[in-house]
Image (tube, rainbow, N blue to C red):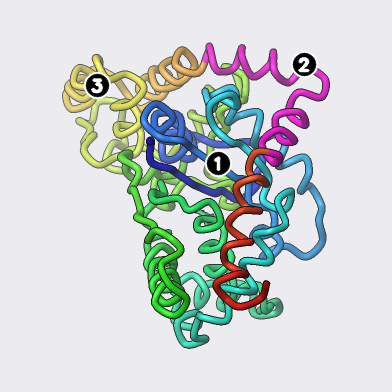
Amino acid sequence: MKGRVFSGARPTGRQHLGNYLGAIQNYVALQKDYDCIYCIVDIHALTTMEGSEGLQDNIREMMLDWLAAGLDPQRSILFVQSHVPQVMELHTLLSMVTPLGWLLRVPTFKEKVRMQPHNVNYGLVGYPVLMTADIVLYKAGLVPVGEDQLPHLELAREITRRFNSIYGPTFPEPQAKLTPFPLVLGLDGVEKMSKSLNNDIEIAISPEETLDRVMTAFTDPTRRFRSDPGHPEGRNIYRLHRFFAPDRVEEIATECRSATIGCVDCKKLLAQGINSDLGPFRERRAALAAKPGYVAEVLSDGAHRAHAIAEETIREVKGRMGLL
Ligand code: TRP
C-alpha cells in the first residue's frame, strides 16, 4: 500500500512563484508515489480574518492554479477543510490531550499576538490543534511543508503521542517532508515572497504583466552604472534564473560579472524564462476556468471521498475516548 500524504494551505487566492516553486510543484510530484490529500484550509484562514470577504473567490482561484499546475483530482483528494466538518469534532477531542502551555509557546502564535493584538482570538491558540486534526483525521504519515511549519509538525507529533499513550495506538506520528526548493524571495529581494507584502509574481498573469512585474524587482545595488561588474551570487533574480533558465544560468552569471548584460537585460531574460515555463500552465488554467461548475464539481467529489475516511476515524476516536 502507498503511504498517505496530507497537506493544507490557506486560501490565499491566486498563487505566486513562491507557492509554485515551494509547494505546488512538490505536491504534484508526490502524487506519483503516494496517495495524496490536499486541502484548502478555510477554517484556519478565519483565525486571521475579520469578516469573510473574498474567501470563496480565493478558494476558487487557488484551486484553479492547483489543477492547472497538475494536481489531479482523479488521483488525489482535493477538498476544502470546512466541507468535511468532522475535523472540527476531532479538533475539540484532541484539545483535551493538549496542554495549554504547549500552545502558548508556539512561535507562530506569539507572532500573531504581535501582529494582531486587537484580535487574539481563541481560534489562534488552537491553530496547531486544528492542523493536527487535519492530518490525523486522514491518518497521514507524511506532511509536505515549508520550514516555517516545523514547530507545528513537532506539536502534531506530541499531541499524537499523547493521544496514543492515553487511549491506545490510534494515529501514526506524522513526519514533515521539507519542500526541496529553498525559500523564494520577493521582488524586494529581502522578504519571503508573499501576497500580503505585495512583492509577489502571480503565476496566472499574462506574459506582459509578468515582464512589468519582474522589471520592478530590486537588483544588484553595487551596480550603479551599466558598465559596473555585477555580483549575481545570492541575488534573488539569479536564484530564479536557476529555476527558469537552468541551462543558461551560468552564462547569464558570467555576462553579469563582466557587465556584458545589465540588470534590465537580465530581468528581461528572467521574464522570458518564466513566461515560457508557465505558458502551458496558463493555457490549461484558462481552459479550466471556462468550464462552468468545474471547480465546484472537483471540490464536491473531493469532500465526498475525504468524508468517508474522516467518518471512520471519528468513529474509532470516539470509541477509544469512551464516547460511543
Ligand atoms: N499551517 C499551514 C500554513 O499556514 C496550513 C495548514 C493547515 C497545514 N493544516 C495543515 C499544513 C495540515 C500541513 C498540514 O501553511
Q: Quadrant of residue 236?
A: top left
User: Mark 2 sits on what residue?
Assistant: 290
Q: Which SS type dominates the magenta stretch?
A: helix
User: At 37% across and 19% down in the image, what residue appears?
Assistant: 265
Q: Is residue 109 above or below residue 138?
A: below
How many numbered tags mark residues here? 3
* Horizontal relation, residue 105 to residue 87: left or right: left
Q: CA distance from mark 2 to mark 3?
A: 36 Å
Labels 2 & 1 near each other (Cβ < 8 A): no
Compared to residue 243, the image places residue 51 above or below, namely below
Q: Amino acid at mark 3?
A: Val
Amino acid marked by disc 2: Ala
Give the labeled residue for mark 1.
Answer: 38
Nearest to the eye among marks 2 and 1: give it.
1
- Closer to the camera in the image, 128 or 6: 6
Q: Residues within 10 Å of mark 2 (few under 14, many from 20)?
A: few
Q: Give coordinates of residue 123: x percent, y percent.
A: 66, 73
Segment tinted magenta in the rendering: 279-304
| Residue 120 part of the magenta segment | no
Q: Residue at x 34, y 55 (%)?
A: 175
Give the CA distance from mark 3 to mark 1.
33 Å
**Of pointers 3 and 1, the one earlier in the residue sequence:** 1
Q: Which residue is mark 3?
A: 249
